[in-house]
Image (cartoon, helix red, strand yellow):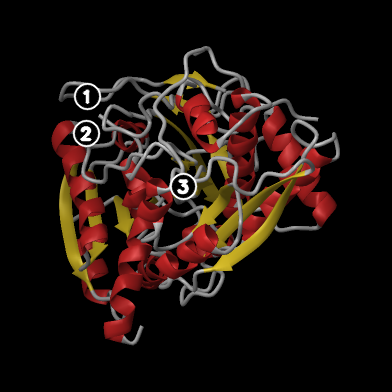
Amino acid sequence: MRLRPWRTAGTILLAGLLVGLPAACSNSKSNTSTSTKPGQTCQSPNERQGVSATEIRIGGMASKTNPLGFDYSQAWSGAEAYFDMVNSKGGVFGRKLNLVDKEDDQALNNTQATQRLITQANVFAVAPVASLLFTGGNLLAQNCIPTFGWNINPQWSSGPSLFGDKGSNLNFKAPSTGAAWLTKKLGKKKVAILAYNIDESKQCATGITNTYKHFPVAKVAFTDSAVPYPVTDLSGDVSAMKRAGVDIVAACVDVNGMGAIAREMRKQNFNATMYLPDGYYDQIKTDPNFNGSYVLTFFTPLETKNPPPGLRDFLTWMKKRNAPVSEISLSGWISADMLVTGIKAAGKDFTRSKVVAALNGMTDYSANGILPPIDWTIAHTDKWNPGCAAYSVVRNGKFVPQFAKDGKPFLCFPSNLPAGQPPEPSYKS
């Protein structure tokens, strides 16, 4: 059973919202691996495109312009900060890494932006991607272009050359051991599930429902999988949750929807805990309505007191650029690290296919401690069961990490657990 789905489903629903908009509107060392054999690869029509004697040209793509009000191009700053660090030490095999093309896909034009990167930009790889829609993912896979980014879209499973920052395979309907454990840990007994009337959001709601069927630690006491977008009036839902005795609310909605739920709960003096699988945003931590809410991350929280080397480097080099520190910029940093790790592992005569093979032979990629290890020998497939995540609580305008032990921020659960009570986690750094 997988820990991942609530988080990624909570984010991917943004892509579903965008699909409906036209009709509605609307000195760090690289990772090493215990695996020494090359993994799955592909063949590119131009294996060394974008590589010269002095430079490795990289392209990036993000939904800088979008109707959701967040600047996803922060991912570019994270990648550029990482390239700054590597270039300050001479680059890779004597070549500097340069982000020479930054495509704004404007949220709805990802295929066109991808085609420009493939045909016009003369780049070796694409890093990072932070796109709300990733309809061009298949094109990048078909051309065997090493591609790295924020994986909230199903297209990340299109081929072996696409590397998401949490592994590439997504499963939204599977039950979550970690969510069941958290519910039990907090002593909650009655769950409410809210979701938009779109497929991605509904799949998230299905995953939550399946969680409490598989791990019967609490009863699903209220469900509304037809919340209108944009949210207008949730007074009826909140009143119904209150009457049902709900004590924990799981929201498969975007940040604006979460805010609407939290405000209505406060208005009705309804003090159930909110669980936010996609809540690691400044708008959440600074809103007093979210005090006491729990947030899930699949990276070491930025607030960790003893950050791992990779996160320390990220914070240092982002400060040098005076660039924003966020989940999205961290994803850009991770994307750049993955690319450089693959190039170094492929050797001086690296090609696109050799980089892909080198990464897909790695079993414990962690971006120098930022992530729980990714096993890239299976992370493109349904065998990938990432069982580790970190939890934080919103407290007085801050995300405060919870449950971590001895500098180990990740709670980890075994996969393929039988139905019953969730086990206690192990802890990993």
Q: Is residue 17 above or below residue 220?
A: below
Residue farthest toward the front in the current orientation of the protein: 45
Kindly check if marks 1 and 2 are in contact, taking CB atoms under 8 A apart as contact: yes
Of the residues shown, which amino acid type is indicated by label 2? Answer: Val
Amino acid type at mark 3: Val
Please tell me the numbered disc located at residue 217: 2
Drawn side of residue 369 relative to residue 380, left or right: right
Labels 2 and 3: the sequence-earlier one = 2
* On screen, residue 18 above or below 25: above
Q: Residue at x 80, y 34 (%)?
A: 94
Residue carrying label 1 = 421
Where's the N terminus, which quadrant?
Answer: top left
Task: Work out whether residue 425 or residue 4 is closer to the camera in this orientation and state it.
Answer: 4
Marks 1/3 in contact by CB < 8 Å: the verdict is no
Q: Which of the 4 image quadrants contains residue 335? A: top right
Quarter of the figure that contains the C terminus: top right
Count residues near mark 3 (Cα–Cα under 10 Å), then give few for <14, some for 14-19, many for 20+: many
Q: CA distance from mark 2 to mark 3?
A: 19 Å
Q: Label 1, label 2: how many angstroms apart (C-alpha)?
A: 7 Å
